[in-house]
Image (cartoon, rainbow, N blue to C red):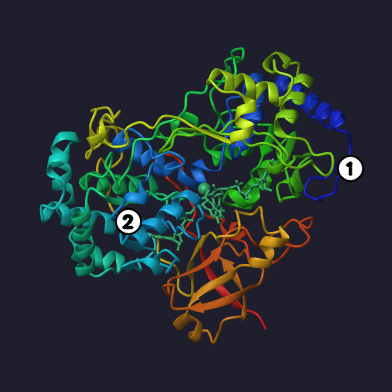
Amino acid sequence: TKNRGEEQWTAVTWDEALGYIAERMEAIKTEHGPESMALFRHGVGGKFLQHVMKAYGSPNIAAPSYAQCRGPRDVGFELTFGEDVGSPERTDIRNSRCLVLIGSHLGENMHNTQVQEFADAVGAGASIIVVDPRMSVAASKARWYLPIKPGTDNALLLAWMNVLVNEGLYDKDYVSEYGFGFEAFKAEIARYTPEWAYTRTTIPPDVIRETAREMARKSPATLVHPGRRVAWYGDDAQRSRAIALLNALLGSWGRKGGFYAPTSMDVPGYPYPDYPKPARGKADNPGHKYPFASGTLSTGIRDATLTGDPYPVKGWMVYATNLLKALPNQEETLNAIRALDLLVVVDVIPSEIAGWADVVLPQSIYLERYDDLHVPWFREPFVGLRQPVVESPHDQKPNWWIARNLASKLGLERYFPWKNMEEYLDTRLKGAGTSLAEMKQKGILTGRPAPLYFDQGSPAEFPTPSGKIEFYSLQLKEAGFDPVPKFRPPTEPPPGHFRLLFGRAPVHSFSKTQTNPLLAEMKRTNELWLNAAVARRYDLKSGDWVRLRNEDGIVSNRIQVKATQRIRGDCVYMVHGFGHQARALRSAFGIGASDAHLITRYEKDAVMGGDGMNVTFVSLELEA
Ligand SMILES: Nc1nc2c(c(=O)[nH]1)N[C@H]1C(S)=C(S)[C@@H](COP(=O)(O)OP(=O)(O)OC[C@H]3O[C@@H](n4cnc5c(=O)[nH]c(N)nc54)[C@H](O)[C@@H]3O)O[C@H]1N2
Ligand SMILES: Nc1nc2c(c(=O)[nH]1)N[C@H]1C(S)=C(S)[C@@H](COP(=O)(O)OP(=O)(O)OC[C@H]3O[C@@H](n4cnc5c(=O)[nH]c(N)nc54)[C@H](O)[C@@H]3O)O[C@H]1N2
Ligand SMILES: [Mo]
């Protein structure tokens, strides 16, 4: 394109496009150094471009699944158990006798294995406890549904722990064998009675006591689910730590029905030459402002692009992430884009971010291509192969092809010693004792299961500084944070305002599937969940149109009201991904409202740099 954001492109050959990109990347390298190119990526497909970026010499590789999603959870669990819960999560939902869901709306959130295991657990009569300001689908399966005031979960978690400790219901043997700093922790939580929590959360004290006792009755097969998108209020790493500590009191880490120990297959990587060592560190977290950031902060790279601090970032390569929908504050993202010398987007649809690219590289979709092997840590070790089942209809290319050809334009051929994906995959698979031919037949290969639980021989190791489960965290204390989580009251909505909450619809993925005709038939738009009593006050009924205005004056597309008793009166809710602003997405453009458009403010997690995004307040504008 000539003019960013106009969504007007000229078709060129692959050779021209990659040649142009390589030329600009060389210019950036000469003028600013290779660290001034950043890669944003999401999902397994991004691995080959990541390889190119490392070979080129950049350490700046970020994904929206960290600071905007599960980063705070990973950090909260690492600080407590020394390990995170991974992805896929090591949650033993299938065997759990009591499952506690805090927000995580399984069933709308279609993490398939988890949803299937959730159905199994419900079928087997597990007690389900759901904490959510909105009565989610999961809440409709629950024995206890706790409609908590948004942003106050830490008060509930502290009170639950208080009950378990006060009533002597926690797993004493487990805590004394594996715990560190329990006495200091105990003293700290003594003041958080259910009565104290009631005034913060609106959850009655007897419900807090009853649910805590139920968790203890079913322990250690009680799983307090760690959630996944936990970047909510800016104190999220500490909330995740409170969840980790509650699980620790119940003795569920390393136990059946709690958290199992995952294993993975041993599949060697392809033997590549070493990467050059970047002269400068990552640009996302200057001065380690967020001391416990364990991943790269996407918004940190955006800040560096805007400010030139710690050094200028001049080029973005964007693979399979629609940054205009995934990062909070679109205007900041656009301003950063305006400061770039190069923006390349690899996508399968003309998304919002593609509309701003200098060069868009159309990728073949997952059914048309090989991807790298999937070798996750899971309940059973396995290798999964993604292979093409249909031809690409036009001149789209697979990610490996794009990466390999870009590398050769950059003079980095030596990093791609293989000719094609078949050769690459076969080499890796032979290293694991199988072959591409065998995998093509089987699709998936499983390995020997290892012990899942401590009592089956899985080692009870906690790679924390103390080697134990840290009820009291000296690491946090030394860095100036609370060694035991505290409750931080959320900001109250101004008069006439509601907190904007958002989540998933089962058939759609983020902002990427709204133009799919089959999925659109099932769900074409989102609606605004509004408490029924509030709706009456505004004289609104289901189907009426409204717009939302945030505190910075941003007004949404019009959206239809869903007046319902299934949500509290202090918040509203919509499904994320709709309200497309890219005209090229013809069938989805302007349909429904966009949470991402409204989220101009966000609260940084001081511990690890996550972006708390549940801090937007909106008022209603009635439509004639
Ligand atoms: N169909 C589908 N499934 C998906 C995805 C998708 O795009 N489509 N995306 C996947 C990804 S990457 C992720 S991270 C997950 C996200 O799924 P979850 O981890 O389940 O995520 P959230 O979006 O944080 O949670 C939304 C729920 O939290 C509730 N909530 C909001 N504020 C609060 C609060 O203060 N306290 C409590 N207790 N609850 C609150 C909302 O009402 C809503 O029910 O979904 C995954 N699954
Ligand atoms: N406001 C708001 N922001 C959020 C969230 C939210 O709920 N609300 N959720 C957060 C969470 S949990 C996450 S994980 C992130 C997710 O953030 P993203 O992963 O950025 O999600 P999408 O917005 O769907 O963008 C994915 C892009 O990848 C493209 N794509 C799909 N398949 C392929 C492919 O095979 N190849 C290539 N090259 N491109 C492909 C899609 O067309 C789309 O443009 O967003 C976070 N940000
Ligand atoms: Mo996510």
Q: In which quarter of the image is residue 569?
A: bottom left
State the image coordinates of residue 91 (x, y, percent, origin top left): 37, 45
- Disc 1 residue type? Thr
Specify the label residue 421 is tagged with: none
Disc 1 CB within 8 Å of nearest ligand 2 atom: no
User: Which mark's residue is nearer the viewer, 2 or 1?
Assistant: 2
Picture coordinates of residue 43, whole percent (x, y): 59, 39
**Of the residues under marks 2 and 1, which one precedes in the sequence?**
1
Looking at this view, is 397 or 75 the one in front? 397
Task: Identify the image quadrant of the C terminus.
Answer: bottom right
Q: Position of residue 137 (x, y in %)?
A: 45, 66
Label annotation for residue 10: 1
Instruction: Confirm whether residue 431 shows in the render.
Output: yes
Image position of 94 (left or right of 213): right
Location of the N terminus by quadrant is: top right
Q: Is mark 2 on a helix, strand or loop?
A: strand
Report the amino acid beneath label 2.
Answer: Leu
Quickly name the residue at label 2. 99
Q: Which residue is drawn at 13% across and 37% down?
A: 176
Residue 64 in which image quadrant: top right
The residue located at (59%, 56%) in the rendering is 596
* Ligand 1 within 8 Å of the CB at mark 2: no
Percent position of residue 7, x then y = 81, 50
Other-residue count near label 2 (Cα within 10 Å), few / some / many at <14 / 14–19 / ≥20 = many
